[in-house]
């Protein structure tokens, strides 16, 4: 990596098809084989019920902090490339998926285009993202609501549909 322009970004990921844990692990191996993206930290994995969409099985969700040289759009394209390599099918909105990446926050950047919105427009509404994000960045400010992840979670009270599935030892970088 060229350490002249390194940006921290936060990603959410989820899966509810096939071997869900293996899907998460494989997606990260593919992601970190992309030049210009390095892992900083990752959360525990949580099992969550689907939000919206058709009837489907539960998800495994996690969050990552990464360091990247890529622009927000290039990072989004890298995430979409991993989804494509894992043969993600997009048949219906919020349908089941083998892997799903969301670019949640790209530090210091606010974007509102048809291709990309940063911070993620529904970040402060999604317990399945907020709970794992609080594992790695509880003091991170969600600029769209001007509150920390921890503050937003405290206001949302309990998160009964977000259950701890696996502690942080679920992914090995080597």
Image: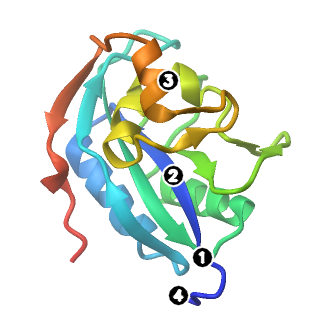
Q: How far apart are marks 4 and 3 (CA)?
A: 34 Å
Q: Distance between the residues labelled 3 and 1?
A: 27 Å
Q: Residue at coordinates 59% horizontally, 54% vertically from top-left?
A: 80
Of 108 and 105, which appears nearest the observer?
108
Q: How far apart are marks 2 and 1 (CA)?
A: 13 Å
Of 74 and 64, which appears nearest the observer?
64
Q: Where is residue 92 in the image (x, y as percent from the top left)?
A: 59, 23
Q: Is residue 10 left or right of residue 28?
A: right
On screen, 83 above or below 13?
A: below
Labelled pair 4, 1 in contact (Cβ < 8 Å): yes
Labelled pair 2, 3 in contact (Cβ < 8 Å): no
Q: Distance between the residues labelled 2 and 3?
A: 16 Å
Q: In this view, does 135 lie to the left or right of 109?
A: left
Mark before the other along the chain sequence, 4 or 3: 4
On screen, 173 above or below 132?
A: below
Of 64 and 59, which appears nearest the observer?
64
The secondary element bearing badge 4 is classed as loop
Mark before the other along the chain sequence, 2 or 3: 2
The secondary element bearing badge 3 is classed as helix
Quadrant (top left/top right/bottom left/bottom right) for the C terminus? bottom left
Q: How far apart are marks 4 and 1 (CA)?
A: 8 Å
The secondary element bearing badge 1 is classed as loop
Q: Where is residue 69 in the image (x, y as percent from the top left)?
A: 62, 76
Mark before the other along the chain sequence, 3 or 1: 1
Residue, disc 1: 6
| Quarter of image, res 26 | bottom left
Residue, disc 3: 152
Q: Position of residue 59 (x, y in %)?
A: 32, 28
Label of residue 1 in the image? 4
Label of residue 10 in the image? 2
> Looking at the image, is mark 2 or mark 3 nearer the viewer?
3
Neighbor class of circle 4 (other Cα within 10 Å; few <14, some 14-19, many 20+) is: few
């Amino acid at each position: 990596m060229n350490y002249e322009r390194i940006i921290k970004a936060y990603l959410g990921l989820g899966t509810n098809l096939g071997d869900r844990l293996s899907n998460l692990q494989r997606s990260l191996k593919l992601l970190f084989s992309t030049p210009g993206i390095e892992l900083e930290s990752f959360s525990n994995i949580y099992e969550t019920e689907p939000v919206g969409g058709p009837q489907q099985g539960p998800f495994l969700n996690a969050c990552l902090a990464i360091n990247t040289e890529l622009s927000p759009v290039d990072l989004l394209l890298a995430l979409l490339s991993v989804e494509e390599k894992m043969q993600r099918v997009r048949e219906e909105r919020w349908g089941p998926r083998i892997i799903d990446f969301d670019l949640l926050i790209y530090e210091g950047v606010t974007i509102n285009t048809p291709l990309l919105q940063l911070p993620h427009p529904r970040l402060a509404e999604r317990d399945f993202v907020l709970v794992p994000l609080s594992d790695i960045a509880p003091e991170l400010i969600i600029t769209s609501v001007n509150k920390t992840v921890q503050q937003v979670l405290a206001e949302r009270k309990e998160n009964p549909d977000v259950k701890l599935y696996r502690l942080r030892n679920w992914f090995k970088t080597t």
